[in-house]
Image (spheres, rainbow, N blue to C red):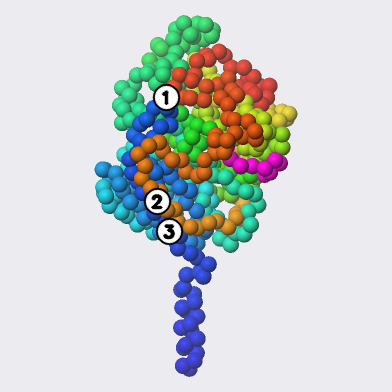
Amino acid sequence: MRSSLAALLVLLALISAPPLFAATVEYDLFIAEQEVNITGQPTKAMTINTAIPGPVLRFTEGDLARIRVHNRLATETSIHWHGLLVPPGMDGVPYVSFPPIGPGATFTYEFPLRQSGTYWYHSHSGLQEQRGLYGAIVIAPRGSVAPEAPEQVILFSDWTDEDPHAVLRTLKRGSDWYAVAKGSGQSLLGAARLGMLGDFLKRELQRMPPMDIADVAYDRFLANGQQEIALPAAPEQTLRLRLVNGSATTYFHLEFAGGPMTIVAADGLAVEPLGEQRLLMAVAETYDVLITVPADGAYEFRATAHDGSGFASVWLGEGSLRPAPDVPRPNLYQTMGHLGLKEVFALTPAGGMGMADEAVAAGRFDQPGMMNMHDMAPMAEPSDHGAMDHSSAAPASETDHGVLHGGPPSPAMEHGHGGHGMPAPLSVMNPNGKKGATDFTLLGADAAGASALAM
């Protein structure tokens, strides 16, 4: 009887004990104000561990995350774990789920990782996210072994040297200043020149504001904190790109110069693979895509702002630079209506590589960025991911000069790429946001097909 009771107690202890493979993964995040120089003009920003974006936080499903956030700002702050299933007190929404982290204070977030995939984190206090407080999260599936393909994390964002509170004031005034600043202002003469005077006057009589697609004129669009980066990739190598849109307001058209991409996950969830030549990615979305880098050059993976005002570039491979095609500018004078959406906002389907174009229904834009996602079916089991390094992120030393971007410096920026230095972008588009949009011509044929598309 006594032995049976002992065996039962041992069994209960084993059942209630945490899994043996679970680990406690710890990070220290130091939030501080810092001078950065992203555009050539020094300005004040907020950094995590002295970098924009902050470090990539890597875990394995089943781990216990313990993240100490040290606030070195003169004001309160917070960190929200976007898309993660966490206890309410750990969600990081100040005055809703937890008290904010005061100046000079440290708060320890601790929660189990109950999912896998690509996610991100950002400040949920005031307009701090717009000043640089964001970073990516990668969670490998439980029991994952060798990766199917090498991985790269790319976090896209928008940047303005202007104080975010000044941006908000400008938006509240309802002026056309940002449209003018990025070259998308509209006029009676411009409408007449394009043969769209009727559309222009109709809108004016209705006291409708100009359709400029995006409200803010940004100075730069960034990939991992820089306008242009190069990532290592061997010829004919297949890569898994973990993509995060950490922008404040910008949707991005994503396109790889080397051919179609294959979407394998959306917002952290594995999906049935779907090929796309160009993908619209909404604010805060994440995608995992597979690409194969051709052997005959360095190919551009470009993120173009959806208003056509600029872009960020990621170069993959070695050799001569192969830029992605420019995204045709939208027709800003086109009357916006439910039936007009198909004409003004048509996306490029997967057909571009010699295949026929598909019709794009206007209703597909109710969920921007989820182009063709209704065709996706959840996978029974997510693909295996590579084993992750769970070492903590050591805080970098303080610095009073330009921002130190996360990750190693791009070799292409410092020593040339495949024997070639990184030249000015090989594009007729200006990658910068402000004053980067000056072409108001009607839209020509889309780069990937024969249809006259707007985007």
Asked whether, in this view, residue 294 is left or right of residue 99, the answer is right
Q: Nearer the viewer, mark 2 or mark 1?
A: 2
> At label 3, which amino acid type do we have?
Glu
Q: Earlier in the sequence, mark 3 or mark 1?
A: 3
Residue 2, percent across and down?
46, 93
Which of the two residues, 359 or 36, is positioned nearer the viewer here? 36
Q: Secondary structure at mark 2?
A: loop
Q: Residues within 10 Å of mark 2 (few under 14, many from 20)?
A: some
The alpha-carbon separation of the residues under discs 2 and 3 comes to 12 Å
Looking at the image, is 19 positioned above or below residue 313? Answer: below
Residue 190 drawn in magenta = no
Q: Secondary structure at mark 3?
A: strand
Q: Residues within 10 Å of mark 3 (few under 14, many from 20)?
A: many
- Magenta span covers which residues? 229-238
The numbered disc on residue 26 is 3
The alpha-carbon separation of the residues under discs 3 and 1 comes to 38 Å
Which SS does the magenta portion mostly show?
A: loop
Which of the two residues, 385 or 209, is positioned nearer the viewer here? 385
Residue depicted at 35% across the width and 36% down the height? 35
Asked whether, in this view, residue 261 is left or right of residue 96, the answer is right
> At label 2, which amino acid type do we have?
Pro
Query: Disc 2 vs disc 3: Cβ atoms closer than 8 Å?
Result: no
Residue 68, percent across and down?
36, 55
> At label 1, which amino acid type do we have?
Ala
Residue depicted at 55% across the width and 32% down the height? 313
Which of the two residues, 254 or 204, is positioned nearer the viewer here? 254
Residue where numbered disc 1 is placed: 217
The numbered disc on residue 395 is 2
Residue 231 drawn in magenta = yes
Q: Earlier in the sequence, mark 2 or mark 3?
A: 3
